[in-house]
Image: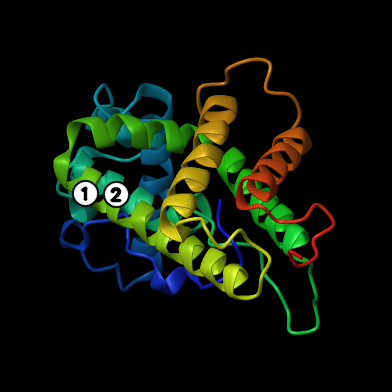
Amino acid sequence: MSTTEGSAEDLPTLVDTALLRDLPTTTRGTRTRAALVAAARVVFERDGFIDSRLTDITKEAKCSTGTFYTYFDSKEQAFAAVLSEAQEDMLHPGPPHSGDEVRTVIEQLRAGHRAYIESYKRNAKLMLLLEQVAAIDANFRRLRLDRARAFSRRNCRWIRKLQDEEYVDPSLDPLMSARALSAMVGRMAYFKYAVEEPDWGSDELLVETATKLWVNALGIPTDGSRRK
């Protein structure tokens, strides 16, 4: 889960930028590369990273192997391109907000959970793929952990702020709380959408359950007021 505090810019990338070539400078090149990236995502999500083949990607994109090598050196590089395009939507930094919008603490939590669940659901197959790649690629695993820690630190700042404002139990360690609660919501989404485990109920039930668990764990009064 991500709160509305912070922005995508303060999060590390999931992509080793050394794997990415410069983008094409022509309209045709841009279009061809985009078709290859879209095809690579289809193949990776369908077959898994390990079992996917370069020829499957070119077949899906309806192009030659030579064309693939014009834009990418390997399927690892194509995977990096897929992640580069999808990562901000996959790991949603939080719902948009305007200066005119006023939310209670509980409404902020609910909105953040809903935005996270919606983006996770859109990218469930790719999220499952990330689990596979993280298990076999140490560099990617490091990048993924760096990003998870950044999300936890940002949620930690939000919790600490609410402690200062007397909404959250002051005895809680804000970083440990952020890491535990963020991991909980992430695994809830993983089991419901990525591996499609049954009996998780509706999307709204997941949002409401996650929100109530955060509220209870942080000691926020159920009416969203400050602690007495």
From what the image shows, is residue 100 above or below residue 166? below
- Where is the C terminus found, in terms of image quarters? bottom right
| Amino acid tagged 1 | Arg
Q: Position of residue 153 (x, y in %)?
A: 41, 63
User: Is the residue marked by circle 2 packed among few (<14), some (14-19), or many (20+) residues within 10 Å?
Assistant: some
Report if residue 121 is visible in the image.
yes
**Which structural element holds mark 2?**
helix
The picture places residue 83, in percent across and down from the top left corner, at 36, 50
- What residue lies at 59% left-to-right and 68% top-to-bottom? 163
The secondary structure type at the circle numbered 1 is: helix
Labels 2 & 1 near each other (Cβ < 8 A): yes
The residue that label 1 is drawn on is 142
Query: Which of these two is toward me, 60 or 44?
Result: 44
Residue at far bottom of view: 99
**Of the numbered discs in the image, which one, if any, rests on residue 145?**
2
**Name of the residue lying farthest toward the front:** 228
Count of number-bearing discs:
2
Residue visible at 51% across and 22% down in the picture: 195
